[in-house]
Image (spheres, rainbow, N blue to C red):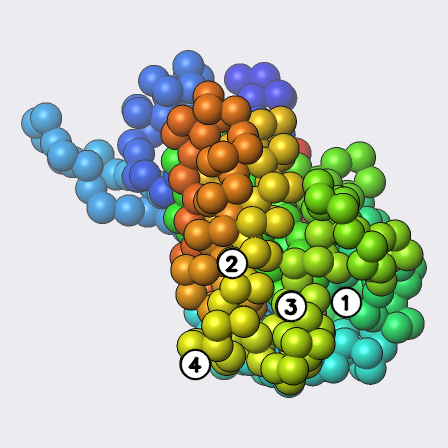
Amino acid sequence: MTRGELSPAGTAALFQFLRDGRPRTRAELSAETGLARSTVAERIDTLLSSGLLKFSDKANSTGGRPPTTVAFNPAARVVLAADVGATHAKLAVTDLAGDVLVEEDKVLDIAAGPEVVLREVCDRGRALLTQAGRGECDLLGVGIGLPGPVEHLSGKPTNPPIMPGWDGFDVPAFVRAELGAPTLVDNDVNIMALGEYRAHWAEHEHMVFVKVATGIGSGLISYGRLHRGSQGAAGDMGHVRVPHDTDVRCRCGNVGCLEAVASGAAIAAKLTEAGVPATSSADVVTLARNGSVPALQYIRQAGRDIGEVLATAVSLFNPSVLAVGGALSLAGEHLIAGVREAVYQRSLPLATQNLRIVPLRSGDEAGVSGAAFMVIDHALAAGQVESLLTQ
């Protein structure tokens, strides 16, 4: 047996076959990988020692004693996931399959600054670990979603409009110093897209998720993975100019941005101007649920405006699923009906032939789920899991 056959890299590669959770015998793994049974046995022993594998039920016997099977062990480590919004945070501890063990909602003001907010996230994370019966030594990593642009490679927010004091702050370094675990950071829309995809649409390779709330953004899933673009700015559809003429000024400094025309904040401003007081997306939703005709009309038009921008994305990206979520989507079918109307009218027929335009299914769990999978997918990839095998 060569040194390469027993290396952490070789063992990590074998581990990828078992990440689907299906129990296998050593003979089955040898047949699937083409490796000698002795090599498979050595690598399985290493993975069992690391805790990443566990013995499973006996396989069916063809005569004699039933062979032993091994399977991925999701309980080997845990992940701390945090979906941090403008005024609240949702935190959870999950296992390595992304299943939530314990969770908590916390009132938290993002404007309090990074040290205050992240220290609270770490403190509450420790409490959740204790509640789950785990310690900081069990942490595979920490995943955090933030309500603003994030350079994913560095984990640093970049000119976030509603996050004073956060620009360029080294979030991963701060959290790692507190909890001693690797930390990944992304914007909230991306982690929601990943969470929704993994929970409900994993059989599809290409998906677009759109969040419509105070702002508007989207997350892109391509071949089952988040597409972030070269600088992490992919999906920032809120600052695409709407096709029809408008002189509404956006907070980014341009005029006619989709966010300035069709977001919850934009609709609230239009309602107030029309004599129906509203200050937030929540107010707009309440008015719509109470049957306010102006609110319902503005929401339907917002859906059309969003759909016109998405029609171009559908023709360019050709997803099979387009999921719509965010605070404004809670107003009912009017928003998504407007989106469907515009997309099916404006996109190429071939691009919409099998397209499903659906409401978000994961609700407020999408963010923490996506933050957890962001960490799991990174840390358990073949190139990363080697470090767990040498600890």
The count of marks equals: 4
Give the CA distance from mark 1 to mark 3: 37 Å
Give the CA distance from mark 1 to mark 2: 42 Å
Q: Which residue is mark 4?
A: 290
Which one is closest to the eye, mark 1 or mark 3?
Answer: 3
Cβ–Cβ below 8 Å for labels 1 and 3?
A: no
Cβ–Cβ below 8 Å for labels 2 and 3?
A: no
Q: Secondary structure at mark 4?
A: loop
- Residue at coordinates 71% horizontally, 52% vertically from top-left? 258
Give the CA distance from mark 4 to mark 3: 16 Å
27 relative to 110, above or below: above
Q: Secondary structure at mark 1?
A: helix
Residue type, numbered disc 3: Ile
Residue 267 badge: 3
Q: Which residue is mark 2?
A: 300
Which one is closest to the eye, mark 1 or mark 2?
Answer: 2
Give the CA distance from mark 2 to mark 3: 11 Å
First-in-chain label (4 vs 3): 3
Cβ–Cβ below 8 Å for labels 4 and 3?
A: no
Residue 175 badge: 1
Picture coordinates of residue 361, whole percent (x, y): 41, 57
